[in-house]
Image (tube, coloured by chain):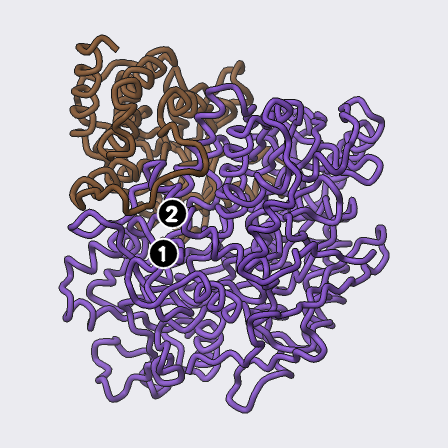
Amino acid sequence: MSLDSKIPPGPLAQKWDKHRFDLKLVNPANKRKFDIIVVGSGLAGASAAASLAELGYKVRCFCFQDSPRRAHSIAAQGGINAAKNYANDGDSVYRLFYDTIKGGDFRAREANVYRLAQVSSNIIDQCVAQGVPFAREYGGLLTNRSFGGAQVSRTFYARGQTGQQLLLGAYQALSRQIGLGTVEMHPRTEMLDLVVIDGHAKGIVVRDLVSGEISSHAADAVVLATGGYSNVFFLSTNAKGCNVTATWRAWKKGALFANPCYTQIHPTCIPVSGEHQSKLTLMSESLRNDGRVWVPKRKEDCQKPPASIPEADRDYYLERKYPSFGNLAPRDISSRAAKETCDDGRGVGPGGRGVYLDFADAIKRLGESMIRDRYGNLFDIYEKITNENAYKVPMRIYPAVHYSMGGTWVDYNLMSTLPGLFVIGEANFSDHGANRLGASALMQGLADGYFVLPYTIGDYFVSAKQAKPSANHPEFKKAEENIRQFAARLLSVKGRRTATSFHRELGKLLWEKCGMARNEAGLTEALKRIPELREEFWKNVAVTGGNGELNQALEYAGRVADFMEFAELLCLDALHRRESCGGHFREEFQTAEGEAKRDDENFAYVAAWEYQGAGKAPVMRKEPLVYEEAHMSTRSYK
Amino acid sequence: MNLTLKVWRQKNPRAAGGFETYEAKGVTPEMSFLEMLDVVNEELIAGGRDPIAFDSDCREGICGMCSLVINGIPHGGQPGTTTCELHLRHFHDGQTITVEPWRAKAFPVVRDLITNRSAFDRIIQAGGFVSVNTGGTPDGNAIPVPKTTADRAMDAAACIGCGACVAVCKNASAMLFVAAKVSHLNLLPQGKAEKDRRALNMVKQMDHEGFGNCTVTGSCEAVCPKEISLSFIAKMNRDYGVATLKGQ
């Protein structure tokens, strides 16, 4: 299989305009003849479902939560980037494009990123019109703040709840369509398989999480907006329900999976407090606008109260190592710097896995009320979890798994290698390369859903000229039967160890061997251990209850079973990529100063993995990354 | 620390439910309430017994999915806190804790501690939006919004739709939830065009779903994890009154 990215010809700045003109259109009256399934109701899914329904398509939307408003986009805190240049500080579409490409360590597709920067402005306009209460100045205009990896202020925000407000905007647009009868919503329903007929995606098989009923849904196109796979690490900032099942099962049906080793470890999370921990909580990157990161210079000071350590004995290591970006160095770089200081024995807090994020200077400069206005809810979250008042003592933070840049491979039209299967938002691989900049996830999710997919999906309908699918097709019946057998198999093991226990062990293994720093020996070891763990899982997992009822143990065990397989692809990809780039840091490939050492000669490509059948090694296909505009420079934030 | 839990178990909406007692042994003050339930569930599953079904997702107080009545108070009674953010340091060793689902006619129990809150979605579908399609919207700065107005709209928009306001209310009224959305959108210039019909349609749907009436006891505000102000109910009543007088 060769990968055709379908990047339009012509100058970068004109590609999207030209492409939009070249895309075939579906007559307004004909749109209602096309059925579209959207799986997921986060920023990408809800915005796509609403926009497609507004255009006249017949949409069905599925989510596993009890309401589309719960999707994990809601937890995004800091903000959304847009090249509005409202701050008059030199921003432009080109600068946002360049910052994003550079931030992604030159491993993203140039044309996609440029388009993302182009539509970023429209997103803000759209959200304002929906009633998203962005932060404003006293004059009534929108205000901005800075985020990591950029030297301009282009981040729009709604207190520390930007994701919530943007998601509610999209959810409300979706709700309007549900009320109008143009979208049929299926909450508490989980997609368990993709159905492919004659090489085209034709629908999905789902499980009703309340009744346990398995049912088939046919459509002219399927859109996956099912988020990322960070929960393969067990502990991450993702919601408990986030999983890889939808994109993984699509992978097994032929949709190639790209760059799984690009995982983002976010530098500012609340440190792990014990073995019982069920998930980790992010403290928004926006805090680094006013907070200063430091550790004691001397190991012996680490257990002393922070206030007792004089300025001269503190190491503000980000400001020291990266003077021009300082505390706003990008996420991958800040995370590794935190790990290095802790490995060096200078970490603070229980277990020495933490660094300080200190607001004392900012409070002195701006006053406590200003800091409360900017970050009040984040300080509240911090206090609830740690029982510490960050207005008085510095926060303790440590990196945690947060986002996955890798995902299903898609072309410029956001279509996967399976015709008729579109993948949007975090679930695809396309825009962030090897590292995502802060406030870009919300931008990408909404760009895909509001402003890209609604144009490109119509071209597929017109070009593909496919027959109307039916849920009675034998392929659907076969998929349903497979799902029932899968559930029956999980229920029949009747082992002694819970799915959580397996998941925790898998996550720990990945965190140690395929986390912030990776090396050949560790990855090889993980690749040996994962199949063993998986085998044990299928021999000894304990799943109670039955299939025909609400059964959270069964739902979860199914997701863990997929993580057990996916983890292997993640490590395989990390092992094959013998270079360091962005979030993928191979210890063998670093500069004398400990910075990531890219190998553009051999690795300037997207690694897209193709499923070959159970028990067979996947095959890698390469999409070369060609940069027409951006120069592949060494990334420096010094 | 060790805790005794009296948990509401109910197989399905039609079955009769009842309390069952569980011991949570060796838990620690740093654990969250849901992590404690995870520990109990782990033991139940390993012993071949059905775990306690409860809703949760983000576990950081923003998705609104978690929903337990703990010792009679939705979300457990710590100010501005959801169940998932509630930590065991607020309990003491040897304490007995009762755990129940939201109780309201409009939120039927699905299983154990899980309820069906889709009535909230239908209220939003009735008018909790601005009727704009994607595309063709004016520049974000075209209409200035005074900071105080935007801030007040944000105060209302912070609602996470968990339903604690309904669960605590002796009338099972949804007024705080509905008022928060009506106020958020009606305050902003972008939402003004539909101000009247929004208030009328959302209130109509709320009544249709079987929520009770508001007698302004203020218990909703007291348990709201996002501390949504009761004053939004006054604002909604005003908007509703004006719309009614206009004969919309």
The residue lying at 71 percent from left, 78 percent from top is A521
Q: Are marks 1 and 2 in contact (CB under 8 Å)?
A: yes
Task: Out of A431 and B78, give the one closest to the viewer.
Answer: A431
Quarter of the image that includes the C terminus of chain B = top left
Residue B55 position within the rendered picture, expressed as x and y whole percent measured from the top left: 48, 35
The kind of residue on which mark 2 rests is: Ile
Which color has been applied to chain A in this rendered view? purple
> Could you tell me which chain the residue with mark 2 belongs to?
A
User: Residue A622: x, y in percent?
Assistant: 75, 65
Q: Is residue A566 left or right of residue A454?
A: right
User: Would you place residue A327 above or below residue A413 in this image?
Assistant: below
The label number, if any, that marks residue B99 in the structure image: none
Q: Mark 1 = which residue? A: A84
Q: Can residue B34 be seen from the camera position used here?
A: yes
| Residue for point 42% across, 38% down | B136
Q: Secondary structure at mark 1?
A: loop
Displayed quadrant of residue A186 = top right
Q: Position of residue A445 (x, y in %)?
A: 51, 48
Determine if marks 1 and 2 fall on one subunit: yes
Q: Residue B109 placed where, x, y %? A: 47, 21
Which mark, by number, is residue A124?
2
Residue A509 makes an appearance in the image:
no
Type of amino acid at the residue the image marks with label 1: Lys
On what subunit does the disc labeled 1 rest?
A: A
Residue A548 versus residue A460 in the image, above or below: above
Q: Earlier in the sequence, mark 1 or mark 2?
A: 1
Which chain comes out brown in the rendered image? B
* Above or below A8: residue A469: above
